[in-house]
């Protein structure tokens, strides 16, 4: 059953809820809960929602990218093996990704690998190294 995240686009939400078999949701703050019961996320931009799906271990399929950063980001994520390419035959890719768990296991592994370390820890280490180097250069 398709569930569409419409954000604050109320017109789109009402239009899609009129389609039999589709559930359209407005702005949500509980994406981890939604993602925990979803089979896959079909994404058009490769932005924050996509990153949240990666963190939840939800396979992502790229389709119909928005202009600008959407096309560029989605292409890069597909090349990196983080997002399945649904740009030509979305239905077939959804069926594959939502099929046996091993069909999307490599994609899930790559996506989870991005969340092994907290980026804040890396920033703190970088700042500490920079400060140490700065103090050394000043003396």
Image: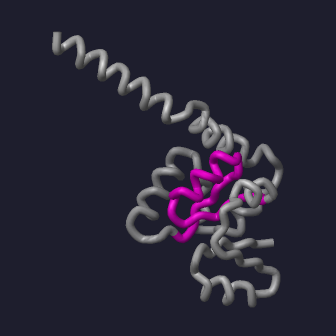
Q: Position of residue 5 (x, y in %)?
A: 65, 71
At horizontal 63% and vertical 59% (from top left) the residue drawn is 61
On screen, residue 128 above or below 70: above
Q: In the rendered structure, does residue 51 fall within the stretch colored magenta?
A: yes
Quarter placement of the C terminus: top left
Q: Position of residue 110 (x, y in %)?
A: 61, 39
At horizontal 70% and vertical 46% (from top left) the residue drawn is 57
Which one is in front, 62 or 30? 30
**In this image, 134 relative to 5: left or right?**
left
Which one is in front, 7 or 132? 132
Residues in magenta, as a range: 38-64
Quarter placement of the N terminus: bottom right
At horizontal 66% and vertical 76% (from top left) the residue drawn is 26
Q: What's the coloring here?
A: one colour
On screen, residue 133 above or below 78: above
On screen, residue 139 above or below 120: above
At horizontal 57% and vertical 46% (from top left) the residue drawn is 81
Q: Quadrant of residue 49?
A: bottom right
**In this image, 73 relative to 18: left or right?**
left
**Residue 41 in view of the camera:** yes
Q: Quadrant of residue 68?
A: bottom left
How many numbered circles are shown?
0
**Residue 96 in view of the camera:** no
On screen, residue 87 above or below 10: above
Q: In the rendered structure, does residue 125 fall within the stretch colored magenta?
A: no
**Residue that sits furthest to the left in the current view:** 138
Q: Position of residue 6 (x, y in %)?
A: 62, 75
Which one is in front, 4 or 72? 4
Which one is in front, 79 or 124? 124
Q: Position of residue 56 (x, y in %)?
A: 69, 48
């Amino acid at each position: 059953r398709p569930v569409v995240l419409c954000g604050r686009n109320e017109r789109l939400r009402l239009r899609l809820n009129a389609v039999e078999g589709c559930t359209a949701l407005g702005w949500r703050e509980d994406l981890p809960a939604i993602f925990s019961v979803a089979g896959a996320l079909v994404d058009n931009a490769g932005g924050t929602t996509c990153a949240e799906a990666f963190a939840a271990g939800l396979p992502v399929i790229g389709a119909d990218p928005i202009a600008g950063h959407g096309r560029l980001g989605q292409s890069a994520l597909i090349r990196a093996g983080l997002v399945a390419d649904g740009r030509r035959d979305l239905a077939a890719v959804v069926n594959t990704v939502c099929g046996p768990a091993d069909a999307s296991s490599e994609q899930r592994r790559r996506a989870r690998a991005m969340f092994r370390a907290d980026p804040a820890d890396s920033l703190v280490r970088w700042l500490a190294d920079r400060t140490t180097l700065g103090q050394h250069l000043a003396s």
